[in-house]
Amino acid sequence: MKTQKLALVKSIIFSLLICLSIFLIFMITISDIQQEESNVIIPIHHRTEDISEILDVVENETNIVKININLNSTNSKQSVATNSMDDIANEKKDQLKQNMFIDLSWKVKIEDKISCLNNNRGGVYLFHMRKAAGTSLRTYLKLLTMNHQMSFHETEGKIINSNILKSPGIMSFTSLRHPVARIKSLYWYEHVEWYYIIAQNPSVAKSYKVWVDAWLDGSEWKNAFTAANPGNTYMEIENYYVKSLSGWKGVGNIGEEDLERAKEVLQMFDMVLITEWLLEGGQVRMMDTYFRISRSIRQIRDMKGNSIMISKYHDVLAKDEEEVDDLLRERNKYDILLYDYAQDLVRYRLSEMFHFDRNSSRVFDENSCPIVPIKLEPMYQKEMGVFRPPKHKGPLE
């Protein structure tokens, strides 16, 4: 009897070992398949513990299913299939550098400025792009400067003096939103909401089409407004980003040279943000990694948008929306190109973020981190503020 029981136990143990072996073989096979898939889907090497989360959100931001850095390469699929993850990442970055004026010193520069910030030195400068989450960004940056006892400076509604971006100790920020979405938001906020809600005079409000026609370059209203406010961009709806960054003075058409200059200036900013990516994603994680304050950038929504106004008055004021949007896309050719460039620039910087160590033992250089005074030098101080010209609620009769 004992012999039979012993034989039965041995048989059970043997069966269990066989089952365990089969299970292990199955898991190894699954692991190999997942590794194969990861070589296709994720072209960036694992560099942080939460890299999978970051890659997921970067993928969402690029609107790309298989490749996180969108370079529109015709050889992308072949490269993904044949190269290792590091090779693919390097290849993508090389292609990106060839297509852009990539400032390879950006990572060093941002680490230096983070070092200044950690030692409560320097200041923050916001070049406020209108209706591109600039108000929320202002709130966030004021919290940052309060935490670190730094000065805050801002320009809104005026072309940039790019020399400010070269000032020692100044950490610079700006944000971009799709040009057509920005213009539509400007219309509903600056024009419709004013006359319907604030002024309580809705009969003065113009339709979307009439408003756009009035503010496009070359119209009688726009010519008179520009002549009265040279260098002002508070109410620009035609290539606003390029005009703001390229040094446009209000005379002449925007062209390729202005676009290239705008790209160069955009790259000079320490932090460029894409408005559509501010609620979630790698961009948010980059901000939270660099700047540890009480509130995440995604939690600050000071301007809630115009959804109620739009739902209530869209059929009355914007029945020609599709036609007008097509016109705006055509007339904002250079802004759309700059917006696409900005997205690629942010993607590149997100990929560099994986190398960043906020607590690195970088030597603090007091000379490169001056205490920026509340008021800048006179030559820069005149560039600070909100430049809101009269008649910006127009067109007026």
Image (tube, grey):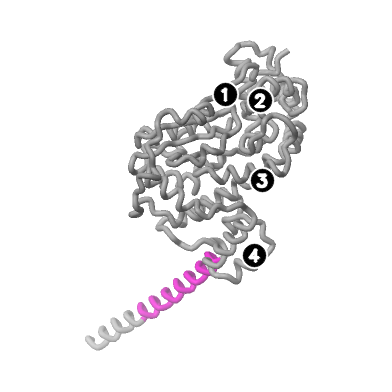
The numbered mark, 4 or 1, whose residue comes first in the sequence reads: 4
Indicate which disc, 1 or 2, sits on the residue closer to the N terminus.
Answer: 2
**Earlier residue among tags 2 and 3:** 2
Query: How many angstroms separate mark 4 from mark 1 (CA)?
Result: 49 Å
Q: Main secondary structure of the magenta part?
A: helix
Which amino acid type corresponds to the residue marked 4 in the rendered image?
Answer: Lys
The kind of residue on which mark 2 rests is: Pro
Residue shown at 69% from the left, 12% from the top? 203
Q: Residues within 10 Å of mark 4 (few under 14, many from 20)?
A: few
Q: Which residue is mark 3?
A: 260
Disc 3 to disc 1: CB gap under 8 Å:
no
> How packed is label 2: few (under 14 Cα within 10 Å), some, or many (20 or more)?
some
- First to last magenta residue range: 15-39
Quarter of the image for residue 152 reads top left
| Type of the residue with mark 1 | Phe
Q: Which quarter of the rendered picture does the N terminus lie within?
A: bottom left
Q: Which residue is mark 4?
A: 77
- Establish if 115 lies above or below 3: above
Q: CA distance from mark 4 to mark 3?
A: 30 Å
